Image (spheres, rainbow, N blue to C red):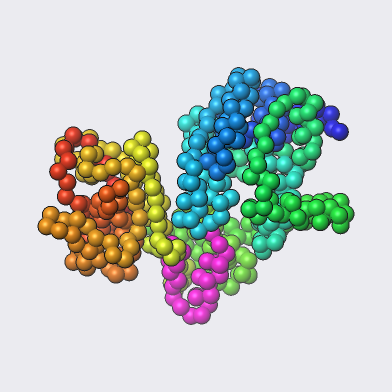
Amino acid sequence: MRQAGDIELSLRSFFSSQGMVGQTAFAVAFSGGPDSSALLFGMAAIGIRPLRVIHVDHGIRGVEEREAECGLVKAQCRHLGLPLTIAHVRPGAIADFARTRSCGLEAAARAWRYHVFEKTMKACRARWLVLAHTRDDQLETILMRALSGGSCAGLRGIRAMQGRYLRPFLDVPKPALLDYLKVRGIQWSLDTSNEGDAFARNRLRQILVPALDAFGSSWEGGLLSTARKAAAEDDALAAWTLRAGFKPGADGRLVAGLSLLSEPAAIRERALLAAISTLLGSARRSSRLASAAFAALDSGKARYSGGGIWLMRKEDRLELSSTLDFPLPDGYFVIIERAGSADRSIDLGAFRILTGWESGKGSPGLRELAFSFPLIVRSRRPGDFLEITDGRKPIDALLAEWHVDPEYRGRVPILEDRLGIIGVLASGFGGKDRFRPSNARDNGKYFSIIVKGA
């Protein structure tokens, strides 16, 4: 069994190597489980006091288990004298999010969790978020990426320092953390969702890892060696891509020389994916998008449109710009649950919807008393209609009257509350904004919705 001091020494060594000893600009992700408990108590033991502890209740497990976990999290933070933020997610919200994004529940929960992390870090002015991923998590991640066809960028595994995220336990096996908790007498909570077989990572942990252990313990060292080699190759490819890739051009476009077309597929696809992330945001894009784009140009086409991008071949260069595109077959669907959450920015494909409150008679937007939350912003569906003064009118007919290009009609935002469709926002697409009639009193407060990039 490792000595308890070994864990604290490991933490001290990590923060010293990053030149962070003495800093206080940290937030810590704290689930209440064994890994994050060892992290939080270990940091406190070596004198690193975070600005904020962040706990996310995903609303996925049973009420009793979640309440017990939140109670323990609060008690531990009181014991350590640390400020705590708990974010409660409405039960079912993550499942809804997963359906609208066509992703798994694990991926949806992770996206939601990191959104909370970013918002809380901004509020408390934390520079770094410290997470408790262990050597076991690293091995599982590399295995999952290898089985799903990951590139060398994926096979390098989780990075100990990536952007604003720090992971000091990546070289520490989970049993060592359990020993630390036992020696220090620290309580932790048990997440029963980790025991089932509903999630891919659980199945890998319960079936594949024991089979590999039976094969021999050397598999762990071999896999980590592969990850180190993949990291070195990834760094080399990244440097090559930077030289050959896209650079800022005019009107917000990115440009690259035609010589990029003759680069190896690995280089040109990396260059395009990096440029797309710069153009549309940091969300991960599939390599299939880059393959499809270059396949179109290789076949002699002058341009490719899809996945929110427009890649064009000119006489002396390649140009990349954003375009309206919704690859999901069922369009988009965003819920604004309550008035307090109304001031926000919503990215839908390659354009953005900004929502917020305005005050004063004559301000643009919906009268506060003319609709109710939750408010839905979604794409058009067959059969949609809008109430008008003398009846109702199909939204398809309104868009046709306004001469909105048929290619973009499915992307026009539709607003809906509990009573049905409130309005259609087609002004950004060459049409008009129109709302259902209302006799509600005008109290001088308006909810504004602005479409950018259309």
- Seen in the picture, residue 319 relative to 51 is either above or below; the reply is below
Q: What residue do we see at 73% from left, 51% from top?
A: 205
- Seen in the picture, residue 92 relative to 359 is either above or below; the reply is below
Q: What residue do we see at 69% from left, 56% from top?
A: 144
Q: Is residue 141 visible?
A: no
- Seen in the picture, residue 312 relative to 376 is either above or below; the reply is below
* Identity of the residue furthest to the bottom in this view: 300
- Quadrant in the rendering for residue 170: top right
Asked if the stretch drawn in magenta spans residue 385, the answer is no
Q: Is residue 298 visible?
A: yes
Q: State left or right for residue 401 relative to residue 264.
A: left
Along the line of sight, which residue is nearer the eye, 71 or 361? Answer: 71
Q: State left or right for residue 164 relative to residue 371.
A: right
Q: Which residues are magenta?
A: 285-310
Q: What residue do we see at 38% from left, 42% from top?
A: 337
Along the line of sight, which residue is nearer the eye, 200 or 418? Answer: 418
* Identity of the residue furthest to the left in this view: 390
- Seen in the picture, residue 295 relative to 134 is either above or below; the reply is below
In the rendering, at what x and y percent does residue 333 appear? Answer: 39, 54
In the rendering, at what x and y percent does residue 269 appear? Answer: 57, 65
Which quadrant of the figure contains the N terminus? top right
Q: What residue do we see at 70% from left, 36% from top?
A: 35
In the rendering, at what x and y percent does residue 232 appear? Answer: 72, 54
Asked if the stretch drawn in magenta spans residue 296, the answer is yes
- Quadrant in the rendering for residue 181: top right
In the rendering, at what x and y percent does residue 445 appear? Answer: 22, 36
